[in-house]
Image: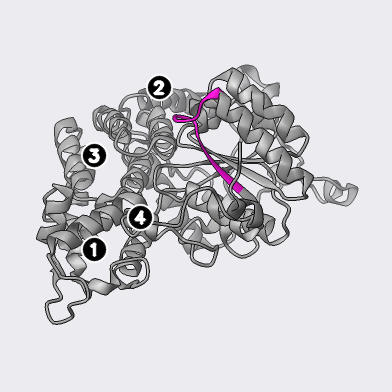
Amino acid sequence: MNTPDLWEQNPGTDRVAEKSPYAPLAERMRPRTVAEFSGQEHLVGEGRILRRMIENDSLASLILWGPPGCGKTTLAHIIAAETKSHFIFFSAILSAVKEIRETFREAERYAARGVRTILFIDEIHRFNKAQQDAFLPYIEKGVVTIIGATTENPSFEVIAPLLSRCRVLTLQQLEPDAVRGLLVQALGDSERGLGSRYLSASDEALEFLAGHASGDARTALNTLEIAADLASTPPGNREKAGEITLEIVQEALQKKALLYDKGGEEHYNVISAYIKSLRGSSPDGSLYWLARMLEAGEDPIFILRRMIILASEDIGNADPRALQVAVSALQAFQVIGMPEGRIILGQAVTYLATAPKSNASYVGIDAALAEVRKSGALPVPLHIRNAPTKLMKELGYGKGYQYAHDYEDGFSGQECLPEKLAGRTFYEPKGHGYEKNIVERMEWMKNRKDKPS
């Protein structure tokens, strides 16, 4: 591959031409330095792993795993620029085998001159096993440093030998506040953004767009550009400067805003209706209020956190699997994201709504906390104290402790509360669902405890 002189003389740039004024807004506004980059503080914040790699010029081959529009490609460009590396953009969709070979030959020429080549592979999960195998010897020899980007779980989509030679860094979906910040920045940037149009945007419009972008900065910025065109403001004409309103953003997104203010009364009304539908065992009501929140742009992670709380507070041991379902739903959603994540939410919601209900665990921990606050730090009974030293044994620590496994059915019935609270009950299961088994077990334990030894 013959490389133009421009690239031979300027490592740290890639083969993409200078950004055209006709490039989409998201491309024009792509951050150029770590300082300009927004989000992913767990990777690029002060002292964090990726920032330290860049600052110390100790870059390893990486796989960046995260949802669309979270900054994977942008980070690769920034890494190349700040480490003064030769950058090659490589698409798993568009690149043929012949181009792969030519790319490595080009990288070898740069390596011979002491210049690192960063090979950015977009959608690396789309390469087959043989293609991924072809990268291995060049990584081993240090000819290229690979940065792969994927929206799919690399554990399933990237071959083990390649995965073992790369650090996997997980990027998170951008929060609505971060997306809003990018929109405001684009509106005010005269060099690369929309600043020359002197546009303004209402708070409602920015909130709506940021909320409906699903953490995808690319979608948000490109929709903002469409909205700017719909506002029909002549470039550079301050007198006729227009405003991007909620209605204009709705038109650009082709979505209507529902009555739902995340910081206001309707937010609390809807989430209350949702939780009460789950608690009241109404799967249809639960799905409806879930749909209302999702369509209005509520953060699904907020919804899932509330579901985890409900699984313990309102279901508890009536169905111990409910907590597992809720936690698994959160983990699965973080991997999948929207729009497919709605399916995971729907499954978890219908399970929780139809599960038997009990708040006995919730009531029990609150009762125990109330007693601790009332009676203070009562002394631990001697028989259940630890006795690691001879002196402690002489003082009676652990004396009389009844080891449960020495008894029939693994139950000794020994009192474990402080003497002042002996016989006190905090947990009173109601006998719904699996708690019926717990009630029977507790009744059996009580009878065994009451029997003379």
Residue 11 in view, yes or no: yes
Front label number (1 vs 3): 1
Q: Is residue 411 left or right of residue 435?
A: right
Q: How crowded is mark 3: few (under 14 residues within 10 Å), some or many (20 or more)?
A: many
> What percent of the width, then of the height, locates residue 423?
50, 42
Q: What element carries label 4?
A: helix
Residue segment shown in magenta: 87-97
> What percent of the width, then of the height, locates residue 265?
16, 62
Residue 238 vertical placement versus 374 (above, below): below
Residue corresponding to mark 3: 279
Query: How many angstroms separate mark 2 from mark 4 (CA)?
Result: 58 Å
Residue 5 vertical placement versus 314 (above, below): below
- Give, as a three-letter code, the residue at label 1: Leu
Q: In which quarter of the image is the C terminus?
A: top right
- Give, as a three-letter code, the residue at label 3: Arg
Assess whether residue 93 is covered by the magenta stretch. yes
Q: What element carries label 1?
A: helix
Query: How many angstroms separate mark 4 from mark 1 (CA)?
Result: 16 Å
Tag 2 or tag 3, which sits nearer the N-term?
Answer: 3
Residue 449 vertical placement versus 184 (above, below): above
Residue corresponding to mark 1: 206
Q: Which colour scheme is used?
A: one colour
Q: Name the residue furthest right.
A: 390
Assess whether residue 69 is covered by the magenta stretch. no
> What percent of the width, then of the height, locates residue 195?
29, 72
Residue corresponding to mark 4: 26
Q: Quadrant of the N terminus?
A: top right
